[in-house]
Image (cartoon, rainbow, N blue to C red):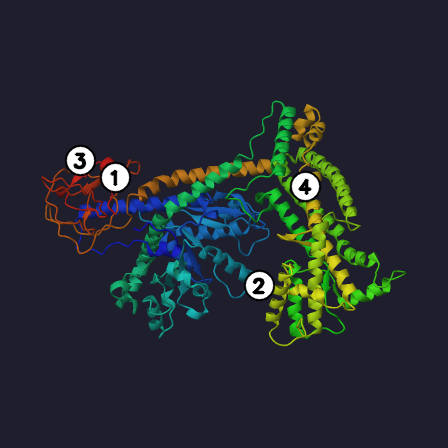
Amino acid sequence: MSDSNDSTSGSWNNIPSPAPASAPIADDQSGTLMQTYTARRRQILDVLNVLTSLGIHNEIDLPRVAVLGSQSAGKSSLIESMSGVMLRFEFDSDGNRLSTPREISFGAPISDKAHVTDRLRRAQLAILHPSIDPNKFLDSDKETSGSSLSFSKNYVCIQVQGPDVPDLTFYDLPGIIANVSDGGNENDIQLVENLAKTYINQPNCIILLVITCETDFENQGAYRLIKANESLKSRTVGVLTKPDRIESGNETRWLKILRNESNSLENGWFAVKQPDFNQLASGISWEAARTAERDYFSATQPWSSLEGEHRKRIGSAALANHLGKMLSDLASIKLPETLAKINRLLEDANEELKNYPVPTYDDPKREVIMLLRDFTKDVAKHVEGLPPSCTDDPADPFTAGLIYCINKTYDAFRLQVHRTAPQFRPWEIKSPPAKPLKSTLLEEVKEDDPPSGCIGTEFHVDEVMDLAQRSRTRELPGNYPFAVKLTYIDETIRTWRDLAGGCFGKVQGIMEDHIDRLIQNHFGRYEHGGLLETVKKVVKEQFARRQTITEKKLESICRGEDRPCTQNEDYFFHCRSNLLVKYKTIYRRSKRNGRLFDVSGDQERLINNAIAGLAQLGIHGLHSNEFVKLFPESKMDPALEIMAEARAYFQVWSLNGFSQVAYKRFGDNVPNQIDASFVSRFDDDLELALVYAIPDSDMCREWLQESPQVARRREALKSRKDRLEAAKDKLAPIVRLLSRSIFTEPSSPPPTAKAPLPPPPSPPSVIALDCAPPPSLVQSMPRRGPISASRTISLPPQPMDSPGPSVLRAVPPGSDDESGPIEISAFEIAPSAYEAVPPSSRRHRR
């Protein structure tokens, strides 16, 4: 048996099948082994039933069998033929899932199978009338009233016990319907289909698809659900009901389905026949119904002529046996995985229960003081900055960290300030350059902008010149008022006040959300008594105090930027000079179709010769773009100077790289002030303010009263923990047994005593034995190669509480075999050929 449970499809492919028998097993061995296999299979299925009764299937996908079919396809009759009665409520009247499922016994246990149908009918009525006492439906003479549901998510449980009943548990889903009767609810069609999908879409659900032969196959909606999802076919078993209703001449079509030649399923099809209406009315017994079924298939064509494997797919007993084996084999694979999930859920429940301790306060005032102190310490840690855990969700602002989220806001603020840079265009808007050249010049101008671009208004050189001309009053020729430069600088920084306020607002929101989470974590369970509300009130007042102080500080910073000023004179002059050269160069090129000089020939060679000549005169460090200073002044030079100076104030170029004046200063000052006045100082005096709010002991005791929601949550967690522990206790022994045994039917023949074992054609399977050999088996024989996996040994079954199986190994006489024990997946090897090896000395060969 493979231990790979990584995928659902893999689990279905790894379900073991019994090896075909080559000869009959001795009666005593066959009986013992079959009883052992049947007992183990029932143990597995009993555990599944216990897990379901505990509600574990609501949290973990358990192996199950769901009966799917159209209405009146014979599903309930089919279940009766293969299996007292219990009502199970998992949802309230509004359709909400209950925290703990309720199971109500519905009548006394039934010893006569003929009464099962009537009891089922009454149980279904009780489920559909949740407002009425279920016991009223046990007596048919009593009248019932009240609103009735069309369908319900709750269900009827049938528990069957006895020596001749199959190892099965069924979920009988409502029949798929295509229409509703007059006055019915059209929504019931989709409701039933959705309810069926919730079961059959579970990866561990074995689907028993019921198709009636009295209706065309294509008209039965149940198969449509299977066909719509190809993955369902691997775990669907088809069954044909009412074969006696087949129209004459259509037998061949249904036989093709039974042979899996048409509408094929990976697990094939079965055919069964249930009692008709007259037989049910006459009170036919269960045994008589099964006898009638066998007689029908034996005497009626074309069923009586079926042979081979197809003959084995006739009758309710064959179907029940097949389903029982599928369910137990699937469970033997999935139960270890289920136990691991239960352990994880149990750990989660225990961890959450720590947050809901039972309140026991001898000194309520001291308890309140300790709670407040722990809260303020936690606030101080978060304000200082906590590194995130590797398991934290980076998308959650709380787990990502307070300072981390605030720093992201600061980065976004600096970028917004940078994007307010004045957008000067050193070419005329009235006579712009050609489009290809304009694109090239625009790229050169934007080299100073941030990668995300700027949001300021564009100003062209002729527009700047026009404003300068209109601003002149009594200045000398060639001079223009400083107010012109101030206008363009103000156009940039006038938005900074709003950006600063927006940045502070975002930081304040982050702080409030983060502190609210801390308050909820520390005092959420004390909402009912008033402690939570008191803490929120004090914290809100603290926010208001820090907000007032911070806003005054930020206003002071913004006022400092109202008048342009910088002490970085060297950087400012250097940046203005570079920008002026750049703007003049671009303007001149915009007027000369991209050229800087009005000469023909090799311009680059001429420029290099000029630079070399100036170097001989002692003028070093010149670049080709600086030759623009030598050209005569143009009418736009004053505007270009205004543009260069306004942009230089926003930013400067240093010799070693990019250095900022105004926007970088403002982009640093605002975040620093917010952090100094609001974030890092928030916990100042917070503990003192909280302590002042502490009342007397009686009020503290009232504060500490937990809310009914908290008490209910604690009880729900305790109930969940109890259910998980009960499930673990029931499941753990079976899983231990599964870890060292294989649950397949034994069918291989025993060899003659002491006969030499021939070497197999392929390496053997390696699986531990399910039984411990008696100590008397201490004989040896010459080893003749690997032990065949098809060989089995008939030994007494090992009890479930045994510490572990022994392992058999071959021991050649007189040799020191160090190859280690060989584990055998079989049940019948001549015991005289091997000796028992205690578990402590085993070594595994894989």
Q: Pick whichever of labels 1 and 2 is earlier in the sequence.
A: 2
Residue at numbered disc 3: 775
- Rounded to the nearest angstrom, the CA distance separating label 2 from label 4 is 62 Å
Q: Amino acid at mark 2?
A: Glu
Residue at numbered disc 2: 186
Q: Residues within 10 Å of mark 4 (few under 14, many from 20)?
A: many
Q: Pick whichever of labels 2 and 4 is earlier in the sequence.
A: 2
Q: Pick whichever of labels 4 and 1 is earlier in the sequence.
A: 4
Q: Which mark is residue 675?
A: 4
Q: Name which quarter of the figure residue 585 lies in.
A: bottom right
Q: Amino acid at mark 3?
A: Pro
Determine contact: label 1, label 3, CB under 8 Å: no
Residue 753 drawn above or below residue 254: above
Q: Residues within 10 Å of mark 2 (few under 14, many from 20)?
A: few
Observer able to see residue 513: yes
Label 2: state its secondary structure.
loop
Observer able to see residue 111: no
Q: Amino acid at mark 4?
A: Asp
Residue 223 drawn above or below residue 759: below
* Label 4 vs label 3, nearer the camera: 4
Q: Which mark is residue 805?
A: 1
Q: Position of residue 572 (x, y in %)?
A: 72, 53
